[in-house]
Amino acid sequence: MNNPKSAAIAAMCAALLPCAAFAAGSIEGSVDFSGKPPTAAKLHREADPFCAKKPMTNPEVLVKNGKLENVWVHVSKGAKDVPVAADAKEVEMDQKDCMYEPRMAVAQVGQKIRAKNGDPVLHNVHTYLGATTVFNKGMPNDKASPIEYVAKEEGMMKWKCDVHPWMRGFIGISKNPYQAVTGADGSFKIDNVPPGKYTIESWHEKYGTKKQDITVEDGKPAKVDFKYDGTEKGTG
């Protein structure tokens, strides 16, 4: 005679098997720069006395030991849309020392983005998706209320200041969480990627987009490296 308890346990294990059989993998690698890095030009900030107190160079291209920083790496094809997690943190874009910080960030459709002014001077936050203005608002000083916005479309959200033309910032927005930004060592890692075949893109504000097709296997890291040589042209 069959044991009902054993049968119930077997049925439960069978139901759980599909979940246990597919362990999420990861995508990791780096972005190499093989050309001669351009010399960072001085930013002309003299028109604003506050900004002029702190001389700065253009951070558009940051290369160290042949690795390129501030590259948005994201899965652009093959992944299903994923709702943003209920506990996802706000993505912050600050204005500090008359610069946007961070230079490059990522957000997911449905995620809140929060802009702050950390300076005692006027900044005008003008953001775009393509050629379309997302919002255009002035922030008189560091006492101004933050600007809050929920990301509605995927793409590259570009940030400018109509008062200080050298100010630039970028937020890559995707419909899934499989994205990252390269650090100072040029590396990136995207965790919890379901097994499957994907197209992954790199995007840099000066050198543009590159693509590769990859396969993510159960519980394994998929390795991918992108290479720029400085001859590429972007749209940043």
Image (cartoon, grey):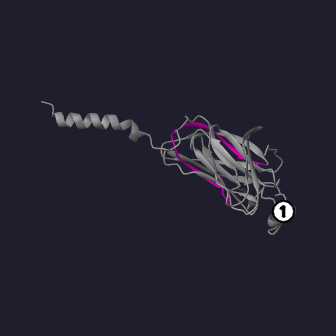
Q: Between 126 and 141, which is closer to the camera in this rendering?
A: 141
- Locate residue 42: give its quadrant: bottom right
Asked whether, in this view, residue 38 is left or right of residue 180, the answer is right
Eyeballing the image, is 155 above or below 92?
A: above
The quadrant the N terminus occupies is top left
Asked whether, in this view, residue 25 is left or right of residue 30, the answer is left
Q: How many marks?
A: 1
Range of magenta residues: 180-205
Q: Residue furthest top?
A: 1
Residue 66 seen from this side: no
Seen at 36% across and 37% down, the residue is: 17
Residue 95 seen from this side: yes
- Locate residue 55: give its quadrant: bottom right
Eyeballing the image, is 236 above or below 12?
A: below
Seen at 54% across and 47% down, the residue is: 26
Q: Between 11 and 218, which is closer to the camera in this rendering?
A: 11
Q: Which residue is mark 1?
A: 48
Q: Position of residue 111 (x, y in %)?
A: 57, 44
Q: Between 24 and 44, which is closer to the camera in this rendering?
A: 44
Q: Is residue 91 magenta?
A: no
Q: Element under label 1?
A: loop
Q: Position of residue 18 (x, y in %)?
A: 39, 36
Q: Position of residue 109 (x, y in %)?
A: 59, 40
In the image, what residue type sits under mark 1?
A: Asp
Eyeballing the image, is 57 above or below 218?
A: below
Q: Between 106 and 63, which is closer to the camera in this rendering?
A: 106
Rate crowding at label 1 as few (under 14), some (14 to 19) or many (20 or more) other CA atoms within 10 Å. few
